[in-house]
Image (spheres, rainbow, N blue to C red):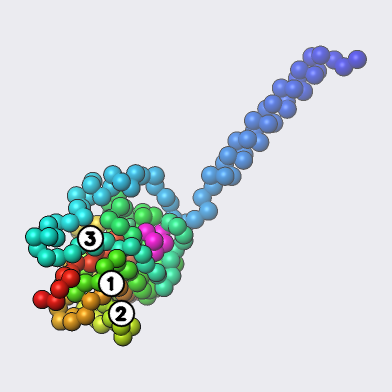
Amino acid sequence: MKDPEKMSKQSMKFKYLGLMFCIFIAGCSSAVTNSKVSPVVNPTETAAANGIKATAVNPAASGLTYQWAIGGEGSTEFSSPEWSAEQIIGEPDSPGCGDYQFSWASAASDSIDTLTVHFPLLVYPQEIIIHESFNPDQVVKVEIQDPEGEGFYTVLQKNPTQVDRPCPYQLVVPVEGIDFKSNTVRITIDQSQLGLGWNEIDAVQLIGTQIEQ
Ligand SMILES: [Ca+2]
């Protein structure tokens, strides 16, 4: 006949081993598999916290159309969905200046990369606003695509610069002399020169008119 006291001790031992196994599994499942850390924030609260509004002017009154991106492709992206090109869709949602997963980041931190951004409506472009949430402003070129000719026209070309404040940073690019409607913008960043690391882009806004002015 089995010893009841021994059975009880064995039962306790199995329970202890089971508990330790669960702790081990939980630890494994939460292990960081990516070199970037994903802070837990509520994206819907972040744009308001940043004081960023979707439109600053009444489009009907100004004749201007304000658009946020509906899609994009990066020449590379750090991961997916976090830090992927789809993170530039819509209004800014990174909670501030930092390495947040709500922005696009290239695969490498010291590369030259492009981000192509799509908007819902064709407009005669007047201004492009690039919302950068980490290590701005290493943007070196901004282009607009002619949807008929498929060519890209440069509207900004400059050297990468270091911007300590403000961050998040808005790069405002005035557009002149574009006599065609477009809904596609291509942004080039050069992270190879300043050694700052990832220049992350949170959102892009295209402002233009439906009628040529
Ligand atoms: Ca974003």
Q: Quadrant of the N terminus?
A: top right
Quarter for ligand 1? bottom left
Res 42 label = none
Q: Quadrant of the C terminus?
A: bottom left
* Frontmost residue, 62 versus 187: 62
Image spot of residue 73 (x, y percent): 39, 69
Determine contact: label 3, label 1, CB under 8 Å: no
Image spot of residue 5 (x, y percent): 79, 14
Residue that mark 3 sits on: 169
**Secondary structure under the numbered disc 2 in the rendered image:** loop
Q: Which secondary structure type mostly characterizes the magenta part of the structure?
A: helix
Magenta residues, start to end: 83-87
Determine contact: label 1, label 2, CB under 8 Å: yes
Residue appearing at x 27%, y 56% in the figure? 91
Q: Amino acid at mark 1?
A: Asn
Distance from Cα at disc 3 to Cα at disc 1: 23 Å
Distance from Cα at disc 1 to Cα at disc 2: 8 Å
